[in-house]
Amino acid sequence: ITMNIGTATSEENPTHSYLGSRGIWITYVLILLITHFMLLTIPFFSVAVAWTLTNVVHCVITYFMLHVTKGTPWGTPEQGKARTQTQWEQIDFGQQFTPTKKFLTVVPVAIFFLASFYTKYDTTHFCINLIALGFSVIPKLPQLHGVRIFNINKW
Amino acid sequence: MARDGFEVAVNGINNNYKHSNGKSNGISAYSNGHKVNGAQSKVQSTKSTPTFKEHFEQTPLGVAIWTYLGYAILVVIGQIRDFLRSIGIEKIKSCTEPKLPGFVPLFQSWESFYTRNLYRRVRDCWNRPIGSVAWAEMDILERVSYDHGWNFELTGKKQRVLNLGSYNYLGFSQNEGPCADAVEDIVNKYGVGTCASRQEMGYLDLHRNLDILVAEYLGVEDAITVPMGFATNSMNMPLLVGKGCLILSDELNHASLILGSRLSGASIRTFKHNDMEDLEEKLRFAVAEGMPRTHRPWKKILIVVEGIYSMEGSIVRLPDIIQLKKKYKAYIYLDEAHSIGALGPHGKGVVDYFGLNPKDIDVMMGTFTKSFGAVGGYLGGSKNLVNHLRVSSHSAIYSGSMPPCVIQQVISSMKIMLGKDGTNEGKQRIDTLAWNTTYFRQRLVEMGFIVYGNEHSPVVPILLFMPGKISCLSRECLKRGLGIVVVGFPATPIIESRARFCLSAAHTKEMLDKALDILDEVGDLLKLKYSRLKRQPALAESDNKELKNGTRNSSVSTFADLCTLSMKIIKTL
C-alpha cells in the first residue's frame, strides 16, 4: 500500500507550512477551549485544578507532538531528509521567528497567565504550571534548534 | 528555494493582478472571501489574446475548521488503534520485521501511520483496475474488501462507468479507427520493439519522420523525441543548464521538472505560482546580485513553467513571461504536458492559445501521453539546441528508442490534428473539447461548486476539503456510474483536497449532462456546494440555489470577520 505524495507536484513534505494555513490557529484554540470545558465539567475538579490540568495536558500533548515526534507520518519522496527533525524543526524549513512559531510560543504563555490567575497564585499550582511552561517554551527557543540533550531522541 | 529576504522595487510589467488563493497565515483582506486572479490582465500581445480569467476561491473559514477537526479526530483514532495493535488487542496486518538485537530497524512505524490508518481505509478509491480501453466510458473491475482495505478481492463483475479521470483530451485513446489501423500495419512491418538505443541501431526512418512532424506541429525548427514523458524532463534538463546557472521554477511544477533541475546541479529558486511580480523581483535580484557569494553573473537563467498545471487547472501567463524573458535576457523552458493538443484554436498548445510566436520560447517540451494517446515526450527548439540534444541526451544514448507502434500512433494522431489526412476531424476534436470545457465549467459553477483554474482549461478541479467527503464522493459517484479522480492531503494542501475532472473530445453532451446530474445529486447529498460568489446565473432555477448559499453563510461570514480582526491583533504582537 503506498500513497502518492509529491509525485504530481513539487510539494514533497507539507509539514513546513500546514500549521500556517487558513483557520488552523482558530482550530487550535477551539480544541483547547473544548478540552478545558470538558475538564471543568468534571465535578471532582475545582476551577484551579481544572486550569492546571488544562495547562499540563496541553503541555504534554504539544511537547509530544512538536518536540518528540520526528519525521513525518507519511513516507516522503525526499529520502528521509526530515527523519531526524522534530516537527518544530521542520516548520517553515527551520526559519526562526515566523508567525506560526510566534503563535505557538504565545499560546502556552497565555495559558500560564490564565492558569496563574484562576489558581489564585497558589504555590503548588504555580510550581506545576511553571514546569509545564518550561517544557512548552524552552524547546521552542532558537538556541535549542536541532539540539538533543544527552543524545535523547537523536535518531 | 524559499526566502531570500530582499526587497526590490518592482516597476516592470504594468499588470494589476491580485494574488490568487488566500494562503496567507490567517489574514484575509476581503470580506466575502474570494479573490479573482487578474480578471483582465493588460498583456501586450496580439489582438487574438483571450481574456485571462483564473479563479481560486478561498477556502471558507468554517469549512477549514471542520476539515482540521476531521483530520484531528482521524489522527487521534489512529493513535488509539496503533496503541491497541502494540499491546496486542488488535491484529497487526501490515508487514512487520523481526526484532534482531544489534540491528537498526528497517521500518519506522510512524512513517506509515497515515497510510496504515487513514489511506488504507479508503484506498478503494484509487488504483481501480480497468478492464477496457480508457475512453469516454470504461469498465471498472469490481473489488470488495472484507477487512476494511487491507486486502481486496475481485468479484469478477465489471461496471461500465463514465470516465472523467483519464487524460484523454482529444479522445485518441481509442482501440479502433484510423490510428489503430495504421499502428497495426506498422507492427506487421517493423515489429514491436527497436531493440537498441537511438545512437546505435535503434534510429529508424520512423523516428526521423516523427521528429520532422513534431517540429512542424509546434512551429519550431527541429525536435527530438524521447520514449518516456517523465524522462524527457529528468534526463534532458541536465544538458541545458549546469553548475553556475540559475533555474527559476514555478512553485507547483511537476516532479519530473524538479528532478531534472536537481540533477542538473544548477541553483534553483521558486517563484509563487503564476505570479509575474514575484518572478520579476527574483529576476531582477538574480541579474543585479549574481551568484550568492562571488556576485559573478549567472551563466544562464532558465525560467521553467508548465502550460497547464494539472492540479490547479491554471494556465501559465505566457505573454508576460516572454516579455520578462526578453527584458532580462533569460531563457524559458515550457513544459506543455497537459496543454499540447488541448489548448488553442489549432490545438498547438498554450503558444497557440495566446497567439504568440513559437520561436520566442527557447525550449518547448511536451508529452504525447495526454492528448495523442501514446507515450513519450518531445523537446523542440532551434536547430542548434536539438543537434546538441541529439548528441548528448542521456535518453538518446542510454535508453531504448521509441517503439514503432507508438511512433505511428503519434504520427497518425498528429496528422489528423494538422488536417493532413484530408478530413477536418482534427478541428472538430478541438472544437468539441473547447465546447465541453466551457459547458462543464459553467454548469459546475452554476451549481455552486468551488471550481479552480482558468476558464479555458480542460482540467477541472472542484474542491472537497474534508477527508470524509473525498472518499464518499468517489464511492457515491462510482455507485451511480461515474469514475473520477480524487486527491487529498498530503498530495494537496491540507484544506484543498479536490476531485479533478479531465474533459475529453470524446465526451458527448449527453455524457456530460449525465455526469453533471450525478455530481449535482451527490453534491447535494454531501453538501459540497461551498461557493459563496454571487454569479449571474444563466438558468432561472439557480436563483434558489444562490439564496440557499447566501442564507447559510451569513453567520459564518461575520464570524470570519471577527476572526480576521483578532488575527490582525495577534499578528502585531
Image: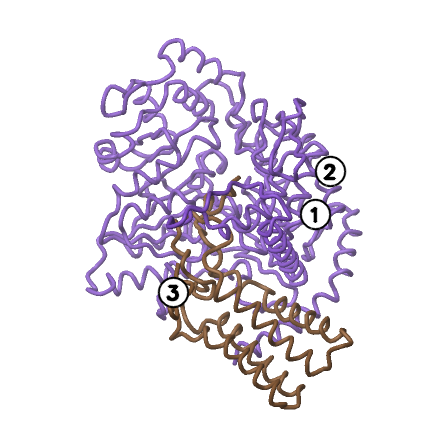
Chain colours: A brown, B purple
Q: Determine which of the numbered discs, if any, sits on residue B517 in the image.
A: 2
Disc 2 is placed on an element classified as helix
Q: Name the residue type under label 3.
A: Arg
Q: Mark 2 Cα within 10 Å, few/some/many (few <14, many 20+)?
A: few
Q: Quadrant of residue B263?
A: top left
**Where is residue B249 drawn, in percent x and y?**
37, 52
Q: Is residue B524 above or below residue B5?
A: above
Rendered residue at 48%/66% (across/down): A67
Looking at the rendered structure, which numbered label has been put on residue B3? 3
- Mark 1 in CB contact with mark 2 (< 8 angstroms): no
Residue positioned 47% across, 22% down in the render: B416
Q: Which residue is mark 1?
A: B446
The label nearer to you, 1 versus 2, is: 2
Q: Are marks 2 and 3 in contact (CB under 8 Å)?
A: no
Q: How many marks?
A: 3
- SS state under label 1: helix
User: Percent x, y for residue B252?
Assistant: 45, 50
User: Gap between marks 1 and 2, in whole Å?
Assistant: 13 Å
Tell me if residue B48 can be seen: no
* Of pointers 1 and 3, the one earlier in the residue sequence: 3
Q: Are marks 1 and 2 on the same chain?
A: yes
Badge 3 marks a residue whose secondary structure is: loop
N-terminal-most mark, 2 or 3: 3
Residue B33 versus residue A104 in the image, above or below: above
Check the residue under mark 2 and report the chain it is in: B
Q: Amino acid at mark 1?
A: Glu
Does residue B449 appear to the left or right of B270 in the view shown? right
Chain of the residue that carries numbered disc 1 in the rendered image: B
Foreground residue among B293 and B383? B293
